[in-house]
C-alpha cells in the first residue's frame, strides 16, 4: 500500500512540475475568498485516484477537490488526499507545495506520503516502521526549551476566520520561542517537524487531507500531535499542534486556552517551561498515539 501511495504521489508530482514551467497559462477557479483551485489540482487528484483505485478498487477516497465521490464509502480503508497542498504558493511560483496521501484503516492512519515535487523530496511512513525522507530515517529534534525552538504555523486567510483570536495565539507563542515561520503548506510543515527542522507546529482551520499523512510521519519520527488541549482527536477539529515531546507539551500549555470550547481565551501570563508544562496525555505517547480517531 505504501508503494502504491508513493507511485500515486510521484504521478501527481510529475503533473505539477510540468505545469510549474508556465503557471500563467493555467485556468484558475475561486472556491472562496483567498481559496483557489487550478486545473493542476484537479488533474493531479485524478491521477492519484486512478492509481489508487486501480490497485484497490474497493477502498474509499476522501479528496480535497472531489470529496468522497470516488471509491467505496463503506470500506474500512480510506485514502485521504490533498493533490496540491500550497496551491497559492504554486500559483505565485513559490516552490513550497506538496502532494499529501494518507491511508486510514478504521479511522487510524496506517500509511503516509508527502511528496515535494519542486525538490524531489519524498517523506513517508508506515505505522510502526518509522518515518523517512528519501532513504534517511527521520527523528524529531532534541530541543527541550521553547525559548530555543523554531515553530511553524499557518495564518488565517479566509473571510470569517477569527483573526483576533489568532493574533492572541501568535503573541503568546512568538514572545516565548526563538522564531515563527509560515511557509504555507501544512503537509510540509508537519514533515519539517518530523525532520527536526521545526521543533513544533500549530495551526487552526486545517482539513483532514492537510494533516492525515503528515500526522503519521510526525509520530513515527518520535513526535507528538494532537489538538490544542493535547487530545488525539484532532483530524476533524480544525486545530492542531505537533512537536517533539518536550516542545509539544509547552505548546499545549500555551494554546489550550484557545481551544474550541475553552472558557476564556486570555493568553497565559507566564512562559511555559519543561518543568511547569503539563506532560502530554497518555493517549499521545508514541506507542498509544492515534493520529486519527
Image (tube, rainbow, N blue to C red):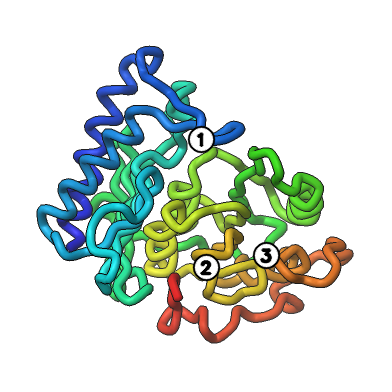
Disc 2 crowd, CA 10 A, few/some/many (<14, 14-19, 20+): many
**Residue 31 spot, x, y in % from top left:** 51, 35
Q: Earlier in the sequence, mark 2 or mark 1?
A: 1
* Residue nearest the viewer, comparing 191 with 36: 36
Is residue 74 at all visible to an observer of this figure? yes
Which callout, 2 or 1, points to the residue nearer the camera? 1
**Residue 161 spot, x, y in % from top left:** 70, 46
The residue singled out by tag 2 in the image is 225
The residue singled out by tag 1 in the image is 31
**Residue 45 spot, x, y in % from top left:** 29, 42
**Residue shown at 35% from the left, 35% from the top:** 41
Q: CA distance from mark 2 to mark 3?
A: 11 Å
Give the number of the disc on residue 74.
Answer: none
Callouts 1 and 3 close, C-beta under 8 Å? no
**Residue shown at 34% from the left, 22% from the top:** 20
Q: Quadrant of residue 120?
A: top left
Q: CA distance from mark 1 to mark 3?
A: 32 Å
Is residue 137 at all visible to an observer of this figure? no
Q: Earlier in the sequence, mark 2 or mark 3?
A: 2
Q: Secondary structure at mark 3?
A: helix
| In this picture, residue 138 sits left or right of residue 147 | left
**Residue 70 spot, x, y in % from top left:** 26, 53
**Residue shown at 21% from the left, 64% from the top:** 59
Q: Earlier in the sequence, mark 1 or mark 3?
A: 1
* Outermost bottom residue: 282
Look at the image and tell me in which quarter the C terminus lies. Answer: bottom left
Placement of 242 over or under 187, stated as above or below: below
| In this picture, residue 76 sits left or right of residue 211 | left
The residue singled out by tag 3 in the image is 251
**Residue shown at 11% from the left, 57% from the top:** 55
Q: Secondary structure at mark 2?
A: strand
Amino acid at each position: 500500500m505504501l508503494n502504491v501511495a508513493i507511485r500515486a504521489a510521484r504521478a501527481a508530482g510529475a503533473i505539477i512540475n510540468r505545469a510549474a514551467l508556465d503557471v500563467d497559462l493555467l485556468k484558475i477557479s475561486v472556491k472562496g475568498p483567498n481559496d483557489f483551485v487550478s486545473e493542476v489540482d484537479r488533474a493531479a487528484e485524478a491521477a492519484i485516484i486512478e492509481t489508487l483505485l486501480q490497485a484497490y478498487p474497493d477502498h474509499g477516497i476522501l479528496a480535497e477537490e472531489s470529496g468522497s465521490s470516488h471509491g467505496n464509502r463503506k470500506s474500512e480503508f480510506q485514502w485521504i488526499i490533498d493533490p496540491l497542498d500550497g496551491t497559492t504558493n504554486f500559483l505565485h511560483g513559490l516552490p513550497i507545495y506538496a502532494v499529501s496521501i494518507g491511508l486510514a484503516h478504521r479511522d487510524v492512519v496506517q500509511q503516509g506520503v508527502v511528496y515535494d515535487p519542486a525538490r524531489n523530496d519524498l517523506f513517508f511512513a508506515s505505522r510502526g516502521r518509522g518515518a523517512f525522507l528519501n532513504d534517511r530515517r527521520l527523528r524529531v529534534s532534541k530541543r527541550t526549551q521553547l525559548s530555543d525552538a523554531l515553530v511553524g504555523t499557518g495564518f488565517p486567510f479566509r473571510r470569517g476566520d477569527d483573526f483576533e483570536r489568532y493574533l492572541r495565539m501568535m503573541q503568546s507563542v512568538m514572545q516565548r520561542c526563538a522564531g515563527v515561520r509560515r511557509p504555507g503548506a501544512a503537509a510540509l510543515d508537519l514533515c519539517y517537524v518530523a525532520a527536526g527542522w521545526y521543533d513544533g507546529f500549530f495551526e487552526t482551520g486545517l482539513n483532514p487531507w492537510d494533516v492525515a499523512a503528515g500526522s503519521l510521519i510526525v509520530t513515527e519520527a518520535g513526535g507528538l500531535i494532537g489538538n490544542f488541549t493535547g487530545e488525539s482527536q484532532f483530524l476533524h477539529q480544525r486545530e492542531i499542534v505537533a512537536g517533539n515531546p518536550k516542545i509539544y507539551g509547552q505548546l499545549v500549555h500555551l494554546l489550550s486556552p484557545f481551544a474550541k470550547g475553552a472558557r476564556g481565551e486570555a493568553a497565559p501570563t507566564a512562559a511555559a517551561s519543561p518543568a511547569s508544562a503539563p506532560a502530554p496525555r497518555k493517549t499521545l505517547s508514541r506507542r498509544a498515539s492515534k493520529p486519527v480517531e
